[in-house]
Amino acid sequence: MNSEYRASCIIGYPAKHSRSPKVHGYWIDKYAIAGDYRSEEIPPEDIDQFISNLAANGYVGANVTMPHKDVAFRLSQPDRKAQRIGAANTLWLDGEVLRSTNTDGDGYVKSLESIMPKWNQGLSRAIVLGAGGASRAIVLALLGYGIPSIYVINRTPAKAEFMRENYGYRIIPANWDNLPEVLPEADLLINTTSLGMHGQPPLELDINLLPSTAIVSDIVYVPLKTPLLVGAEARGLTTTDGLQMLLHQAVYGFELWFGVRPEVTQEQYDLMASDIPIY
Ligand code: ATR
């Protein structure tokens, strides 16, 4: 364990709503680390300066959220994974060099693995709703686990097309109108859009079209049980939620900054969940 004081933070605008300080704060206490994880609300006009001077601002690294992911990517040395995704969510200082990676895809897969260790066995078709940064990270991870075909359904078709160009023929771009045809064949359905989040429009989809063996995931975590997950659970389908992903995506950054690989536990999940509206 590292006894030297270190600090990390979540950089966003806004940032106050972020649950990341609670995730990392829990582990800092649990592993008795001499460190801190803060929230930094940085307006767009100050972001270049803030990230370029991360060490002078007192940090060994950071998580980055909306709307600063592009700047973080541009001002750092992204690893191969972040380069392929075209977005970074985790920064760390390697001497003088600011490096970045993207932990969203692995975080998602780990959240799935934690409830279903053999989730990818026989899984041949996934449907991913959305084609933004989180979708690109999750889809890249699914490809790495050998999933043969992944439908990417997006409001703006060009972004799904772009994913096929970058990730190859296993990506099948489609529209929301195609859902009735593709849902009956899906083994895994993942919502990566903001639809269903508090304050956003609902996600409209007929859950009854999915096979009874399908897994359903939502990366939205406010509310914890989105209407999509409520519908899936009512049908007895296996589900994962956005809080599980949030916890698992945080593991690698914590290890980079504080030198301890933290464990995601049910106790921590329950503690975090107690703070989030269920419906
Ligand atoms: P993130 O980093 O969380 O992935 P993002 O890159 O802004 O965020 O992506 C948001 C995703 O949600 C996109 O796929 C977006 O669709 P568009 O590419 O068409 O914008 C999707 N999304 C957001 N609001 C939506 C809405 N009202 N209807 C359909 N899709 C929506």
Image: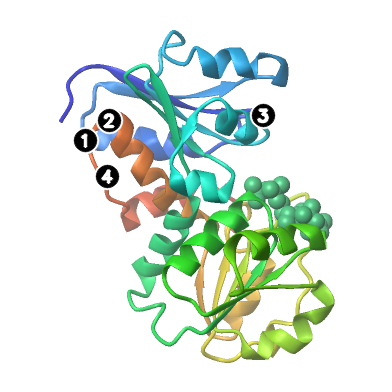
Element assignment for label 1: loop
**Of marks 3 and 4, which one's residue comes earlier in the chain?**
3
**Callout 1 environment at 10 Å: few (<14), some (14 to 19), or many (20+)?**
few
Could you say where residue 43 lies in the image, as x and y percent from the top left? Answer: 69, 19
The one nearer the camera, 78 or 5, is: 78
Residue that badge 3 annotates:
14
Q: CA distance from mark 1 to mark 3?
A: 29 Å
Identify the residue under disc 1.
31
Furthest-top residue in view? 56
Do callouts 2 and 4 mark residues in contact (Cβ within 8 Å)?
Answer: no
The reply to whether callout 1 and callout 3 are in contact (CB within 8 Å) is no
The Cα atoms of the two marked residues, 3 and 4, are separated by 27 Å
Please state which amino acid type lies under the numbered disc 3. Pro
Callout 4: CB less than 8 Å from ligand 1: no
Check contact, mark 4 vs mark 1: CB within 8 A. Answer: yes
Give the amino acid at mark 1.
Tyr
The location of residue 191, given as percent across then percent down, is: 64, 65
Instruction: Report how far apart the C-alphas of labels 2 and 4 lie in the structure.
Output: 10 Å
- Work out which quarter of the rendered image holds the C terminus and state it: bottom right
At mark 4, the secondary structure is loop
Q: Quadrant of the N terminus?
A: top left
Which callout, 3 or 2, points to the residue nearer the camera? 2
Would the CB of label 3 be found within 8 Å of ligand 1?
Answer: no
Q: Are marks 1 and 2 in contact (CB under 8 Å)?
A: yes
Earlier residue among tags 3 and 2? 3
Residue behind mark 4? 262
The residues tagged by marks 4 and 1 sit, at their Cα atoms, a distance apart of 8 Å
Residue bearing mark 2: 258
